[in-house]
Amino acid sequence: MTAKPTDPEQEKMMQENYLWDASGAPDPEIQRLESLLADFRQADRAFVLPAGMPVAPRKFRALLVGMFSLPRLAAAAAILFALGITIFFLRPKFEPGTGATWDVANLQGAPQIGTKTIDANQAPVKLRVGQTITTNGDSRASLSQFDLGEIRIDPNSRVRLLQTDANRKRIQLDVGTIHAAIWAPPGTFVVDTPSAVAIDLGCAYTLQVAPDGSGTIRTTLGWVGFHLNGRDSFIPAGAMCSTRPKLGPGIPYFEDASSAFREAIPKFDSSLENSPTRIAALSTILSEARKQDALSLWHLLSRTNPAERDYVYARFAALVPPPKGVTRAGILNLDQSMLDLWWNSLGLGEISTWRFWEQSAAPQPTPISQQPPQKKQSSLKDTH
Amino acid sequence: MAALSELRTPRSGPPAVNLPYETGGPDDALVRAAQRGDRAAFGILYARYSRMVHGILLARVPFSDVDDLVHDVFLEALPRLSTLREVSRFPGWLASIARNRATDFHRRVKPNEEFNEETTSAEIESPAPSVNPPTHSSAEAHAVLDAIRSLPDAYREPLILRLVEGMSGPEIAARTGLTHGSVRVNLHRGMQQLREILGRKALPPTGGGL
């Protein structure tokens, strides 16, 4: 469909770097077109599968049904056993943190690993544990691993690879923005930031860290856990959450909540207990909350004092009646099993995934701020 | 009790994120996982390719219908994914579904209903004008979009992916399955033709100098 370009055309074409990949000197004419046409760009929109959509394609399910005859199962078991034995003896020796690498690709400009620049046209280079990728104002890079996912690094960011073994992949985002699309099992991918640790629970999300160490996370698929010294926030698709140094993650909220609701959340997070600002913010949150905003109310239960909690409980229960086994007294006493039950009833994620991660995360991940770790008592018992 | 996630309304607030759509990702593994029925994998494929599908559709159908059609394309692709034998062909396969969906859209639109002025016998080959555009856009933006849509297929798709969807040339190549050379030539020639059309229309420059 494309004719071979003539030599003069080829020469002119190669000068159009801005049209090709937005590199080189900006072309004001193209910039103007981009600006004019920006309103037609695709808006971020979650993909929703209809409730009746089969998880497995029909052909595959039919195949599965056909496979479940006893002789076939026995033969399959024998083959799997033989295969397992073979793999066990032939498996490569894996030394965590020494040989495992991630692929880094240049997406724009001149990102660097240490002091070495990654060229635009070179094949993906390897990033080893302990190495740092830095992007300046004009560069972007991607970081990927076959069995984990892909992380896109925006301009003005600094990312360090901390750990990459079979059960845990961990990076440190000092400053800047990353977009992560993760298909590794929930709890495998962890990002340390100056003010919280982000734990992937099966999702895609964007994480930003400002120079002062504060951060913001926005989730597009699945959900993410934000964690600091016993304070946890869960951020499902469509929601966002901020975090601040020493205080940790705030109350998550859906981005389509009313503007009054969204403005009241950071006010509540940052104000002192019993202050007029906090009381006014809580009042706004409760009055503006929709059924979906039970996400925020659930988190508020553990971030309020007993008097405030009673109001939160009443509003939460009015929007999402507590499931069987959950009582007012139990919630006011922050009974963790009841809180977990109520969370699960929201349909935003199975909290056992998180509890499993908490148990398996030994030692607890420490954010890169230098504050001393505090002993974890209950993730749901702290107020501020 | 109904799960809360089922009760969520479409987001109308500020845009959440721009998902990764860059080159170099192990899409083959994702496609295989989606073929096995992994919804999360399919969700990530949606995140990576929805912008490309949006651009392909925007090159052919009215802006107001594009979002719904993007959703339709993925709903159509999901049950058919198991029939895709070579997973590396996923980008081209998905692009074909999007183009066919646009063709179906024009077949179903009744004459004199929406495109009575511009619809011709060759409508399937030539795009619909940008009717029902966003209120914030200027008339000039619609004129530019229509000018791009008047270009040949090979030029209008990469130009829309580049100028509207914000994808770079290498990203367009990776997402559409075309070579870098083809995309570069098509962008260059498409841009040349666009300049000529816009020059003929003599759009008033507003600081950039078209």
Image: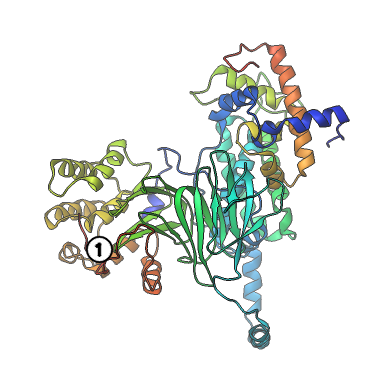
Q: Nearer the viewer, residue A223 or B10?
A: A223
Question: Which part of the image, by quadrant, shows the C terminus of chain A?
Answer: bottom left
**Is A139 left, or right, of A48 in this rendering?**
right
Q: Amino acid at mark 1?
A: Leu
A57 or A83, nearer to the observer: A83
Q: Is residue A288 above or below residue A225?
A: above
Residue A312 seen in the current view: yes
Q: Residue A21, percent across and down?
A: 67, 37
Q: Quadrant of the N terminus of chain A?
A: top right
Q: Position of residue B104 (x, y in %)?
A: 68, 38
Q: Left or right: where does residue A118 sit relative to residue A14?
A: left
Residue at point 37%, 64% (across, down): A366
**Badge 1: chain ID:** A
- For label 1, count other residues whose C-alpha is less than 10 Å away and answer few (under 14), some (14-19) or many (20+): some
Q: Residue at x 24, y 69 (%)?
A: A377
Horizontal and vertical percent for residue A355? 36, 70
Q: Which residue is mark 1?
A: A380
Q: Is residue B152 visible?
A: no
Q: Residue at x 66, y 88 (%)?
A: A78
Rendered view: A160 above or below A45: below
* Residue in the image at 58% along x and 45% along y: A140
